[in-house]
Image (cartoon, grey):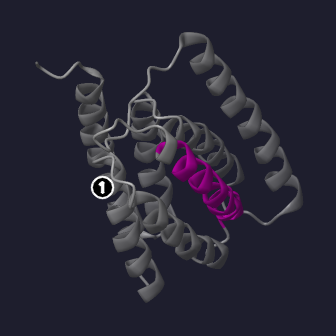
Amino acid sequence: MSALEIIAVVVSFLGIWLTAKRWMLCWPVSLLACALYFKLFLDVRLYADMVLQALFGIALLYGWAVWARGKHDAGEVVVEPLPPLQACVGLAAGAVGAVAIGWFTSHYTDAALPWMDSTLSSFSLVAQYWTARRHSASWLLWIVADVLYVGMFVFKGLWLTAGLYAAMVALAVLGYLRWQQARRPMPA
């Protein structure tokens, strides 16, 4: 456990908590978390997750812009349903990305866990895109990915990060429930 990991965990937890509450501050906080984890994953040779942090940075900028436009007059971010076809396309893209990234990292890098790392990274990109598009279903994908991430980080000895991802499972459940409630019409 390094100082970098401790700081990254705290900042990441704050970013996810702010996202679950649908507060715009989640975006800059999450960008900082990405930068910290980029360096940490480079240090422990989880290259797909390192690149994922850079891609998350781009996705976070996109999400920030989408959320800024997708608010009620009261300032709350509007939650949108995920159409079934879009869900299928997203999951298929995640699978294709997992195979492509896994093949590349298993053949051309010294990645520690190329297939697991690549699969989780690819589906995390799908979940991040769905989050940016304000789909409550994103939290369901985050729950599955985060549970698997816990195991990977335990295996790599990143105990604090594994603990963060375990907490992120709970935050994802909270986020899903809050976002589902936000889809319901407000009482008159």
Given the current orientation, which residue lies at the most extreme top position?
84
State the quadrant of the C terminus: top left
Label 1: how many Cα within 10 Å (few below 14, some 14–19, many 20+): some
Residue at 68% over, 56% down: 55
Q: Position of residue 28 (x, y in %)?
A: 48, 66
Q: Amino acid at mark 1?
A: Trp
Given the current orientation, which residue lies at the most extreme bottom position?
3
Residue range (magenta): 46-67
Residue at 71% over, 61% down: 51
Q: Which residue is mark 1?
A: 17
Given the current orientation, which residue lies at the most extreme right position?
108
Magenta segment, prevailing SS (helix, strand or loop):
helix
Q: Position of residue 141 (x, y in %)?
A: 47, 33
Q: Position of residue 49 (x, y in %)?
A: 63, 59
Residue at 62% over, 48% down: 121
For residue 140: magenta?
A: no
Given the current orientation, which residue lies at the most extreme left position?
188
Q: Is residue 40 left or right of residue 137?
A: right
Quarter assignment of residue 56: bottom right
Q: Is residue 62 left or right of residue 67?
A: right
Q: Position of residue 89 (x, y in %)?
A: 67, 20
Quarter assignment of residue 60: bottom right
Q: Helix or strand or loop: what does disc 1 sit on?
A: helix
The answer to whether residue 28 is above or below residue 66 is below
Q: Is residue 175 left or right of residue 24?
A: left
Residue at 60% over, 37% down: 126
The answer to whether residue 124 is above or below residue 182 is below
Q: Closer to the camera, 145 or 114?
A: 145
State the quadrant of the N terminus: bottom left
For residue 56: magenta?
A: yes
